[in-house]
Amino acid sequence: MVKRLNVIRRENPALHSDRRLRFHGTDNELLLCYSKTTADLTNVILVVANLDVHHRQSGWVHLDLEALGLDAPELGESLGTKLAEASLRSDSASNRSTSAIR
């Protein structure tokens, strides 16, 4: 697992420094959401972590789209129906599961 994390860190310039770390709100105190970006927004990492090691958690994530280099129309166009289906609903099964959107 450590080897995979090191590969992810090397492949993503946003993870090379502590700059441009932003926390995003959730409606569930057991979910932590944050993003890291490069200054030019060519690399954006979005993480939603479940802080409950025993139970699945779900909740709404309130993203700062401007900080992610997106605006609502652009986001709707790029994600299309995926956005409507997901409704920005986060359903994290465990602390160990991660997802990436590229």
Image: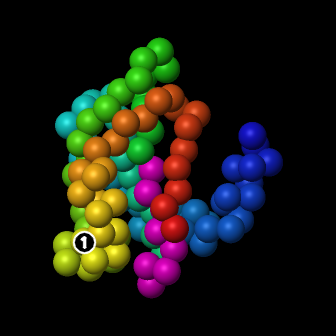
The residue that disc 1 covers is: 76
On screen, 91 above or below 23?
above
Left or right: 3, with 16 as reference point: right
Residue 72 percent across, percent down from the top left: 19, 72
On screen, 94 above or below 77?
above
Left or right: 33, with 6 as reference point: left
Residue 35 percent across, percent down from the top left: 41, 58
Q: Residue at x 24, y 57 (%)?
A: 84
Write down the quadrant of residue 68 in the picture: bottom left
Of residues 100 and 17, the one nearer the viewer is 100
Q: Amino acid at mark 1?
A: Gly
On screen, 27 above or below 4?
above
Write down the quadrant of residue 39 in the picture: bottom left
Left or right: 7, with 50 as reference point: right
Magenta-span inclusion, residue 41:
yes
Of residues 32 and 90, the one nearer the viewer is 90
Magenta-span inclusion, residue 64:
no
Q: Which residues are magenta?
A: 39-47
- Residue most extreme to the right: 3
Q: How many marks?
A: 1
Residue 88 percent across, percent down from the top left: 27, 51
Q: Residue at x 20, y 78 (%)?
A: 73
Colour approach in the figure: rainbow
Identify the image quadrant of the N terminus.
Answer: top right
Residue 57 percent across, percent down from the top left: 35, 27
From where the camera sits, is residue 11 visible? yes
Q: Residue at x 34, y 75 (%)?
A: 78
Q: Residue at x 25, y 32 (%)?
A: 28
Q: What element does badge 1 sit on? A: helix
From where the camera sits, is residue 70 visible? no
Write down the quadrant of residue 40 in the picture: bottom left
